[in-house]
Image: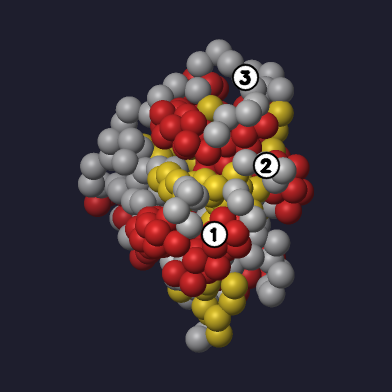
Amino acid sequence: MNSFVVFGDSTCDLGKEMREKYDIEYVTMNYSIDDEEYVASLDWDEQGAKKHYNLMRGGKRVFTTQVPKNVYYDSFKAVLESGRDVLYISCSSALSASINTAILVAKELEEEFKDAKVYCVDSLISSLGQGYLLMLASQKRGEGLSAEETAKYIEENRLRVNQCGTVESMEYLRRAGRVKASKAFFGNLFGVKPIIISDIKGQNYAYKKVKGTTNARAAIADHIVDAADGVYDTILISHADCEAEAMILRDEILKRAEFKEVIIGYIGPIVGASVGPGTVITFTFGKEVTIEGNE
């Protein structure tokens, strides 16, 4: 039996196969469309991914929630009752306040279970960047590290997960308040693609823009290969219903460096609500992020 359970949440964008491979659990957020609420399943149990993104393309607004307190409580308590600890790696606190609720629940449960521990770590990233940190936590658990040791490792290395991607429209990020960028980015972007990273505070930061999709792919590929710092292990690419574009971006990156593993998956309903259909984001482990975004 594992000494602790690794939890993510609905923003980690790890599909069922990857969660099972690495023995990762997640707590669910919720979202609503036309006042109908859905559980934000990463397996799209209630609504298929294509239908979801087509609704967004048709102009439907998606509203999201944090992880409800009772979901944290029930999920973590079940683990503590089994005699194991909890390590929860949350969405970036710059993008979601869910971790604050998790910390409160952790304190309550540690009062109930005197010998148990619930560790809550802010990933300072989201989507498959957060997912990659969960995978690393699972690997460290497999190496025999305790929950406390693993939490420390993640905190010390979280800024080494580099993000670079682009969106079809900045409107979703602007409307959700999930991006730092100069006012110029919110003007006429016809034919122009913003290049978006995750900065030192865990904010999405549109740090430059380029002309056209081809140049955007090249800029992302260059950024990711440079960030890998000569160690070409894993790249993760998440997309909002644009798998073909994710594949082309993968090939563009592999022209520059032979990464050992490529993981491609859907952006889930929570992150997707903020970035919009047509988004593609790439992640890799390497140099520590030092950029701080400013508006």
Q: Is residue 98 visible?
A: no
Q: Which of 23 and 133 is in front in this view?
A: 23
**Local crowd size for mark 2, using a 10 Å CA cut-off: few (<14), some (14–19), many (≥20):** few
Q: Which residue is drawn at 54% across and 59% down?
A: 76
Q: What residue type is labelled 1?
A: Phe
SS for dot 1: helix
Going by the image, does 174 lie left or right of 113? left
Which of the two discs, 3 and 1, labels the residue nearer the N terminus? 1
Q: Is residue 35 visible?
A: yes
Going by the image, does 238 lie left or right of 202? right
Where's residue 293, x and y in %?
Answer: 28, 40
State which quadrant residue 174 falls in. Answer: bottom left
Q: Residue furthest front?
A: 114
Where's residue 243, x and y in %?
Answer: 69, 49
Q: Which amino acid does label 2 sit on?
A: Asn
Label 3 sits on residue? 232
Q: Which label sits on residue 2?
A: 2
What separation in Å lies between label 3 and label 2 (alpha carbons)?
30 Å
Q: Nearer the viewer, residue 56 or 102?
A: 102
Q: Residue at x 69, y 52 (%)?
A: 15
State which quadrant residue 176 falls in. Answer: bottom left
What separation in Å lies between label 3 and label 1 (alpha carbons)?
35 Å
Q: Nearer the viewer, mark 3 or mark 2?
A: 2
Q: Which label sits on residue 266?
A: none
Q: In this view, does 86 lie above or below 209?
A: below
State which quadrant residue 28 falls in. Answer: bottom right
Q: Which label sits on residue 76?
A: 1
